[in-house]
Image: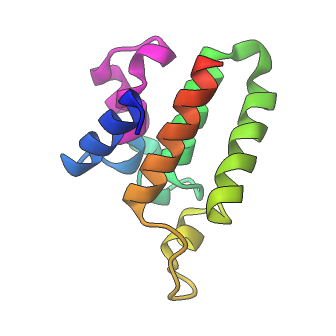
Amino acid sequence: MSEKANKAVENHKSFYSCSASVLCAFADEAGMSEQEARAAAAPFAGGRMGKCGAVLAAEYVLSKRFPDSADEKLAAFEKEFTDMNRSVICLELKGALTGSPLRSCRGCVTDAAEILERMCSE
């Protein structure tokens, strides 16, 4: 696992929300402190905005890191995440409506962080 992806997983193991786990691990890429990142991630946590919080946090970083090509980056990120997990929607990933989870929260944090780290280094 890559360095920042590992940090995101460690954050999640330390009871950060899915969104804070990713955004705090990539705070420098978004041009903010970890404290600012944790506050910025709060509205994304727990699928409150429909999408997986880890996905929303990664998309936030991509928007900050690549403002001139954000739409392309976000579309590429969502496609890759969806190809891996069949959805970016929190309730679908958790299996809340079907009883069959597609991916665990920790798995979503891992996948989002690994994709994000690769995209930030390209």
- Towards the viewer: 27 or 119: 119
| Rendered location of residue 13, percent (x, y) | 22, 50
| Rendered location of residue 80, percent (x, y) | 70, 47
Please give the name of the residue rendered at 79% of the width and 30% of the height, measured from the top-left corner.
Answer: 71
Is residue 88 something one can see in this rendering?
Answer: no
Magenta highlight range: 20-41
Is residue 35 something one can see in this rendering?
Answer: yes
Q: Main secondary structure of the magenta part?
A: helix
Image quadrant occupied by the C terminus: top right
Taking the view exactly as shown, the residue that stands out farthest to the front is 1
Please give the name of the residue rendered at 54% of the width and 36% of the height, measured from the top-left corner.
Answer: 58
Please give the name of the residue rendered at 45% of the width and 43% of the height, measured from the top-left corner.
Answer: 43
Image quadrant of residue 121? top right
Can you say whether 20 is above or below 50 in the image?
Answer: above
Can you say whether 94 is above or below 35 in the image?
Answer: below
Taking the view exactly as shown, the residue that stands out farthest to the left is 14
Q: What colour scheme has been applied to the protein in the rendered image? A: rainbow
Taking the view exactly as shown, the residue that stands out farthest to the bottom is 99
Left or right of 65 on screen, residue 80 = right
